[in-house]
Every structure is written in C-alpha cells, then in structure tokens.
Image (cartoon, rainbow, N blue to C red):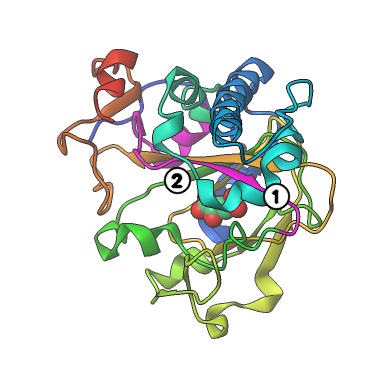
Amino acid sequence: MQRNETHSSPLTPEQLVQWENDGYLLLKNVVPESIINGVRDRFAIVVDGIINELKEADTIDDIGTDLPFETRFLKVAGEHANRFGRSWRGQIATSEIFDLHYAEPLIDAIGQLTGTDVIGHPVFNARPKLPGQQLTVVPWHQDSGYFGTISEKSLIPTAWIPLVPVDETNGCLQVVAGSHKLGVVSHHTENREGKFLEVMDELIEESQIVTCPMEIGDALVFNNLTLHRSLPHTTSNIIRWAIDIRYLRDGDHPGSIYWKDPDFKWVIKSQSQPLTSLSDWLEMW
Ligand SMILES: O=C(O)CCC(=O)C(=O)O
C-alpha cells in the first residue's frame, strides 16, 4: 500500500470525525462544472443512440432534437425506457467518465479518507431515474452486498454525483448514519421490478436515516458498508440524472468485481506510482 504523500487536505477535522462516526459525507462543490458537463454530454450521446434505435424501429415518430438533456429521454422515449435498463456502465466507459474520477477537490478528499494514493474502482453506473418509474428505485443496501464479504475489510468509497438538483421529491439518496459499523449484512433480491439487492427492514435504524438533497457539483461520499437507498421520483418534470463512481484504498481487495485483467490497478493520484493512462484504462472494458 502506498501512503498518500500529497498535502491536499480539504476535509476538516470535524468532517473526518463525521466520516468515522456516520460513514458518509456530503461534500459541497467538489466536482467542477466542466467535468459535470462532459458527463452530461456523454449521457446525451447514449440517449441519442437509444432514440435513433427507437426511431429506426418505427417505435417513435418525433426524436425531440431540440429538447434539453433534463427532459429529452423522458419525453421522447419515456414509455420505452425500461427496456434500456436501470443503470448503464459499458456505454459510458469513455474519456468523460474517466475524467470524472479525477475531479478535484473530490479526489483530495478521497485521498484523505483512504490515507493512500487515489485508486479507481471498476464499478460505476449512470442512473436515469424517470418520474413514476419503479425500475430505478433502489432499496436499502450496502455496496458490499454486491461486492461480497471479501470486501468487508476493504475501503471502497462511493461518490454519488447528481447531474440535476435532487431532493426527496425526485429521487435523492438516503443513508443510515453509523450503519457502516454493522459489517456486511445479509441481502436478498427484492420482489419489485428492479430486482436489486435489499436488506431486511429490521436492520434500518429509523432515527438514523438522513435524507440528502444535493446541488450540481456536490458529491455524497459513503463507505461500502453504509446502508443507503434512493427515493422514488414523484415529480413529473425532469429526469433525475446521476452517476455513482468508486475508489479503492490502495492495497485493498476490490471485491468480487474485476477488470478484464484482474491485476490491473487504476492509479489516479500518486507521487510514487505511474499514473494510469486513458488508453490503458479503455483497454480494460
Ligand atoms: O442512484 C440511485 O438511485 C442509487 C444509487 C446507489 O444505490 C448506489 O450508488 O449504490
């Protein structure tokens, strides 16, 4: 494991205590607008591809070229959206998403939390959540529920980043403060459309639930053991666009999800290890 020799320390002592006690931090203004715009542009390209596919199949007439990113997928393809999945990864493994993982000051905060060089993790997801859509409502879970018990001792911080303002009416996240101290708990597959992993309600300490409204540029960073969920989208105007990305404490096991080459290490920030190039990263998909 490489200790983090860089000196950027954007987190206050109070935030570090909150991270230890609560297992999450809501960081304001840590992702620059230019990087957010790159991610939005990439998602817009995926939407364009979906809409063209529907048009070619004569499923839709109007392709809504002039509609904004916030509404186009909903207005043009909304009733067909479920067939394109609840989250996207392969389609967004591109330079814009690579760049997002380098956002400063986010990665300085990550380096402070892990205490090591900043290492990227292969799991990230674009999450278009449409109004009234059940498929994309994610129930209570720990990310380690997906990574397996092998990840229990690893630190794999998630950064959840909205591309539109979010609150409890359009599908923001909730976390259970302190739940990272439970270890990996038992998950089962939910009976709802999404078939996500979920935990038994008994494990949720109601008094510790924190709802996290956020603005563009914010990141909600949480421990891989922190219980969290996303709320239903109950308003009818815009898509709740978000992306979740992950990092790894250097030397820790990434869990039961690997790159094409299981020995690949994505070095994002280090003074002693060679940094990973975009082309090396693209080859891992
Ligand atoms: O974006 C969402 O709706 C859910 C995100 C989530 O649960 C996660 O990133 O682990």
Secondary structure at badge 1 equals loop
The three-letter amino acid code for the residue at tag 2 is: Pro
Residue at the spot 25% in from the left edge and 18% down from the top edge: 280
Numbered badge on residue 157? 2
**In magenta segment, residue 121:** yes
User: Which stretch did the figure color magenta?
Assistant: 108-132
Camera-side residue: 178 or 241? 241
Classify 10 Å Cα crowding around label 1: few (below 14), some (14-19), many (20 and above).
Answer: many
Classify 10 Å Cα crowding around label 2: few (below 14), some (14-19), many (20 and above).
Answer: many
Q: Quadrant of residue 238?
A: top right
Residue 252 lies, with reference to residue 281, above or below; the image says below
Residue at the spot 71% in from the left edge and 54% down from the top edge: 171
**What percent of the width, then of the height, locates residue 70?**
75, 33
Q: CA distance from mark 2 to mark 1?
A: 26 Å
Residue 24 visible in the picture: no
Number of on-image labels: 2
User: Residue lying furthest front in this view?
Assistant: 58
Residue topped by disc 1? 130
**What percent of the width, then of the height, locates residue 27?**
65, 38
User: Residue lying furthest bottom in this view?
Assistant: 202
